[in-house]
Image (cartoon, helix red, strand yellow):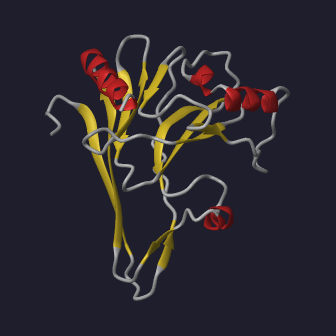
């Protein structure tokens, strides 16, 4: 239950298939926050290259700068290096990850960016509703944004590729799909409590 002084929002989305026949569904909740220089990322997943996978393919709309492929290779080998958002890290152009999030005992996955002042940007959702988690970081002269944990039904390679991988949700006629999220700002005290809960979930 969110109190009246809370800076958190409960956000839900429901998709209804009004047809009588099945419908393919792809969804990604692009919940962005502003990155904080030297902010720290904490989330309910193993901090391994197997569980935090950087996208190595470069989409056609991106023009990589010198050193960008090498930066992706470093992240692929050791994703922990992006957990502190040091200003010199090369998220220009954007970098995307797929993360194998772990739910806590209540069924929620959590992610936060702890800011240098002790507060945090925060999001939680249920992986049983959205099986994939995407992280997106873009720090360019024109864009400065982070999606710590996008609840998603698929990865980011597009409909045809995701269908081949079996990542498309199929809604039968008359059926519904929904996702429920809580996101916003945590106080310093709430941040420390959330970090303790996240670390406990990571160890299970």
Q: Residue at x 49, y 53 (%)?
A: 28
Instruction: Kindly identify the residue that appears in the image at 34 percent across and 71 percent down.
Output: 176
The image quadrant of residue 191 is top left
Q: Quadrant of the C terminus?
A: top left
Q: Is residue 91 visible?
A: no
> Vertical placement of 14 versus 47: above or below?
below
Q: Nearer the viewer, residue 19 or 79?
A: 79
Residue 40 vertical placement versus 134 (above, below): above
On screen, residue 17 above or below 134: below
Task: Work out whether residue 50 or residue 85 is closer to the camera in this orientation and state it.
Answer: 50
**From the viewer's perspective, is 79 left or right of 153?**
right
Q: Is residue 7 left or right of residue 173?
A: left
**Residue 46 position within the rendered picture, expressed as x and y whole percent measured from the top left:** 49, 32
Q: Is residue 41 visible?
A: yes
Q: Residue at x 49, y 18 (%)?
A: 39
**Residue 202 location, quadrant:** top left
Q: Quadrant of residue 110?
A: top left
Q: Position of residue 120 (x, y in %)?
A: 37, 23
Image quadrant containing the N terminus:
top left
Q: Residue at x 25, y 42 (%)?
A: 106
């Amino acid at each position: 239950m969110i109190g009246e002084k809370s800076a958190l929002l409960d956000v839900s989305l429901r998709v209804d298939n009004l047809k009588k026949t099945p419908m393919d569904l792809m969804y990604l909740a692009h919940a962005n926050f502003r990155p904080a220089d030297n902010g720290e990322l904490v989330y309910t997943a193993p901090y391994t290259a197997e569980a935090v996978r950087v996208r190595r393919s470069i989409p056609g709309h991106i023009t990589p700068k010198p050193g960008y492929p090498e930066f992706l290779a470093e992240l692929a080998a050791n994703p922990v290096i992006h957990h502190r958002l040091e200003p010199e890290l090369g998220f220009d152009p954007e970098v995307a990850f797929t993360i194998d999030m772990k739910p806590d005992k209540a069924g929620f996955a959590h992610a936060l960016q702890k800011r240098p002042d002790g507060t945090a940007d925060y999001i939680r959702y249920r992986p049983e509703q959205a099986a994939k988690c995407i992280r997106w970081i873009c720090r360019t002269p024109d864009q400065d944004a982070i999606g710590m944990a996008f609840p998603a039904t698929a990865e980011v390679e597009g409909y045809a590729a995701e269908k081949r991988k079996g990542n498309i949700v199929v809604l039968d006629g008359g059926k519904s799909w929904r996702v429920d999220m809580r996101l916003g700002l945590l106080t310093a005290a709430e941040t420390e409590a959330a970090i303790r809960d996240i670390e406990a979930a990571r160890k299970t």
